[in-house]
Image (spheres, rainbow, N blue to C red):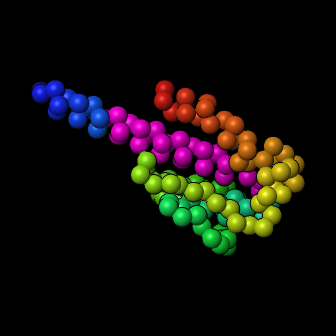
Amino acid sequence: MKFSASLKKFNDDALAEADRLYRATNIELFNSVIRDTPVDTGRARGNWQTTVGTPAQSSSLRLDRSGAEAQAEVIQNVSGLDKVNYLINNLPYIQPLEYGHSKQAPAGMVRRNVLRIKSIIRRIIR
């Protein structure tokens, strides 16, 4: 194999692995936020919306006590390195929930998982 072909293969392999890592990290982070969202009716969990390129602008009517539907949407919608992935919850009470309004999640959902991002990445790399 010629040197330039070897460099191209290395570049392609490195980009593919970086893309896989980016996608897997987003999926794990987003799903962790959904799992950590307090549950009463399931509306807060159901309102997590995964979009690519542009954040969701409205709230959803989805009730998802288990979070399975929202997590399936994460897996379906998360894109690779060439796009920005968004996890958005537009419910008016999501910010109070994030800042301790619920005894089920006194440390929040987003803040708690963003603090874990390095350990999430390390686990995915292994």
Q: Say left or right for 91 vs 104.
A: left
Which residues, given as a range, are shown in magenta? 13-39
Q: Is residue 87 magenta?
A: no
Magenta stretch prevailing secondary structure: helix
Is residue 70 visible in the rendered image? The answer is no
Q: Give the residue displayed 74% in from the left and 67% down from the top.
A: 91
Q: In which quarter of the image is the N terminus?
A: top left
**76 or 50, nearer to the observer:** 50
Q: Does the magenta stretch include residue 32?
A: yes
Task: Find the residue positioned furthest to the front.
Answer: 4
Q: Say left or right for 52 vs 111.
A: left
**35 or 87, nearer to the observer:** 87
Q: Is residue 61 above or below residue 109?
A: below
Please count the marks in the image.
0
**98 or 34, nearer to the observer:** 98
Q: In which quarter of the image is residue 87?
A: bottom right
Q: In which quarter of the image is residue 10?
A: top left
Is residue 15 visible in the rendered image? The answer is yes
